[in-house]
Amino acid sequence: MTAEPTYLAPYLDAARRHAGGFYSLLWASPNTQAARFDAICRLSNLNNKSLLDLGCGHADLLDYLLSRNITPADYIGIEAVPQFIDISQAKKHRNAKIIQADFLDRPACMFVGADVIAISGTLNTLSAEAFYSTIRRAFDATAEQIVFNFLCKSSLAAASYLTWHQLDDVSRFAHSLSGNVQILSDYLDGDCTIAITKEQAHP
């Protein structure tokens, strides 16, 4: 029997305990999830964009966007937890596709031609090496921008499986990829959202 990857194990365990329901996603509450989605929307205009949601869970980000009259041109969700895939596919959103894949094991799955890649919550169980490699790969894969949130203080990283990263370190890394970096950390103490936009090539 193949061992569960360390970064997926908390989700797989929670999915078994909560039958794949909301608390399987490891969010503290729907309000804290929504606060992160709002931060993404403040940094990124997702209307009429091709959107890849990396570690999409129940495709709740798409639900949130549609509730605010923000309509992506198309939506692709990548998710590794089978119970989450069943729930997101059952929503039958128009122009939405859910792909079962582990992006750490198969990073090529990020290269779907998306304008924007969003990562919300997915980075919170990754090691520092996996955290930074995922951001770099996602930046390589996106046509325009990546926008992601992460835990930046220990205050929200109380569980043993959660990891957090110094904002200054992540900011320096983001600026090594592009000069166009926006940062929000005003919505939840201990959480931060960063958008990294590709700079236009000069002729």
Image (cartoon, grey):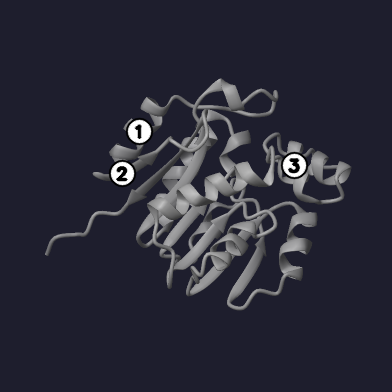
Q: SS at mark 3?
A: helix
Please tell me which of labels 2 and 3 falls first in the chain.
3
Q: What amino acid is labelled 3 in the image?
A: Tyr
Q: What amino acid is labelled 1 in the image?
A: Ser
Q: Which mark is residue 11?
A: 3
Q: Distance between the residues labelled 2 and 3?
A: 30 Å
Residue 121 found in image quarter: top right
Which residue is identified by label 1? Answer: 171
Q: Is residue 188 left or right of residue 93?
A: left
Residue 14: give x, y in percent of width and height: 81, 40
Q: How far apart are marks 1 and 3 (CA)?
A: 27 Å
Residue 33 visible in the snapshot: yes
Please tell me which of labels 1 and 3 falls first in the chain.
3
x 48%, y 61%: residue: 111
Nearer the observer, 186 or 10: 186
Residue 114: give x, y in percent of width and height: 45, 65
Q: Distance between the residues labelled 1 and 2?
A: 8 Å
